[in-house]
Amino acid sequence: MPELAIITLNRREHSVLSHLWKFFPFESDIQYHYLYPGKEDEEITSLRSNVHSLAFSGKLEEVIEAMNNYLKEKNLSHICFSSLETQAVWSRFYKQNAVTIYTSQDLYLADISVLPSACPEKLEAISDLVKRDIAVLLSEAGTFLLPENTTIYPDFNSFTRTMSHEILLTKNKDLVSAVCKASVRHYFVLHLINNKVSLNLSLDTESFDFGYVFTNLSLATKWIKEGIDSALQERNKGYLPYSVFAYYYDIYMSHVNYEEWIDGIIMWYKQINPNPLHKILELACGTANASSLLAARGFEVDACDASPFMLQVADSKPIKPNLYQAYLTDPIPKKDYDLIFCIFDSINYLLHPEEISIVLDNVYEALAPQGVFIFDISTLLNSMVNFYDSTNYLKVHDAYIIQRSNYNTFANHQLTHIIIFRKHLHNYELSEERHTQRVYYTPELIKLCNASKLKLKAIYSPEKNHNLLGKNVEKLDKNFFRLFFVLQKER
């Protein structure tokens, strides 16, 4: 089984990482080893069975040596450092010369200040690693021996304007610092030491944020399973849904009356379940606005979401449910919930009917007898009226958000392209996310519900107070923008 070691020598960085681990989607087919300084952290030791956390105490030299002995004992070769500082301290202790390579979607830059002047073979090793030709600036061209195919640029702006498939090599640390600090890019950082590669989470960079670290950790798992080429290619694909957008989601949804939604869900629960409502689970909770209101009302509330970025935002709220990371189709770890709900058209993100059947089966197992499951869908009418060939614009405190939407009539897919320009120093960083939802028809969902162990009790619309189940269900998708399905575990 592939194994990854994550190392920090900084207690502040450990504090950041210990919070991040709460929602990181650890892959079950990888063994993670997290090595950190200080006393044992109980929250860390309670992570999943494939996550091994070890605390090392003592002087810095003793900590480094003990960590390295552990790496040798476990034969761990894939290493990810928490920061540039941690890696530099580690390298100095072992007197290693590390070439640091910064990669982004449109710029590759290598700090080769540790290399001697006569080292064309080592420069070629860098080129081979990232699959890019070598480039240098004219001011440095005479300071070291270069491979024959090297391109020389008069200045840095000339290099960046070409958008060429090259990596810029430099010994100028001031240039590296200026580029990394002034740039709006988020870099995927790797080190090359004696032809061995290690990665870096860059927790000490100017542009650090949780999304950045989550992305780099995900790339680290890609690296150990498929190689550095796959990790670099994945880095250039852009952002996952609800990653950067997660930090603006609450502003984007500020028009929603969450109290009204919660009141409706509780009312529908009471209509079919005579038992008091105590224990609640929200699936695909997002930033947990609905669950937080329920927690504030005194209910026992759990909530999960696939996006660690959304969960990190949810976890920052003063009143919140018990949060954990899980995909919508994952088995539900706890049982005997009185109410499970999944709203804001999260079900539409399941593109295959079989996935809905999995959710219904999992919910059945997690509900108490007479427990209730409520989910909603965005209908065909909503897609055709509000999202067919439409563009929306929103200005927030530090960003501009553009939402471009369309409906694919052949695949029944609602396509949303979210473009975010985030302010960074004097520039803007561009982030893009693509969301795909399936527009299900009501008869199709009724069939899936009837095939499950749950009993479909009602279908509601916010515009109508009465039960729409049993009416002309074929017309519901063209008459209502949103529909709520209410199901019950009868025994």
Image (cartoon, grey):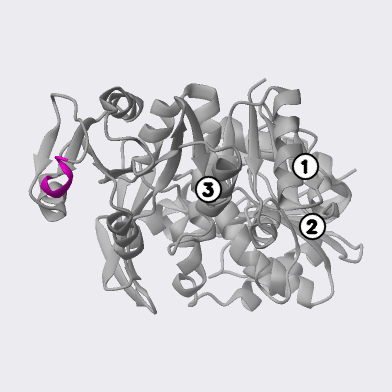
* Position of 357 relative to 46 (above/below): above
Residue 273, horizontal then vertical, whole percent: 85, 60
Single out the mark in the foreground, 1 or 2.
1
Query: What whole-number distance in Å separates the C-alpha atoms at marks 2 and 3?
Result: 51 Å
Quadrant of the snapshot with the N terminus: top right
Confirm whether residue 479 shows in the render: yes
Quarter of the rendering containing residue 387: bottom left
Q: Amino acid at mark 1?
A: Ser
Quadrant of the snapshot with the C terminus: top right
Residue 392, horizontal then vertical, whole percent: 29, 67
Which range is magenta? 138-142
Single out the mark in the foreground, 2 or 3.
3
Residue wearing tag 3: 88
Confirm whether residue 347 shows in the render: no
Secondary structure beneath disc 3? helix
At horizontal 70% and vertical 56% (from top left) the residue drawn is 341
**Circle 3 Cα neighbour tier, 10 Å, few/some/many (<14 / 14–19 / ≥20):** some
Residue wearing tag 2: 339
**Circle 2 Cα neighbour tier, 10 Å, few/some/many (<14 / 14–19 / ≥20):** many
Residue wearing tag 1: 53
| Residue nearest the viewer, comparing 230 with 56 | 56
Secondary structure beneath disc 1? strand
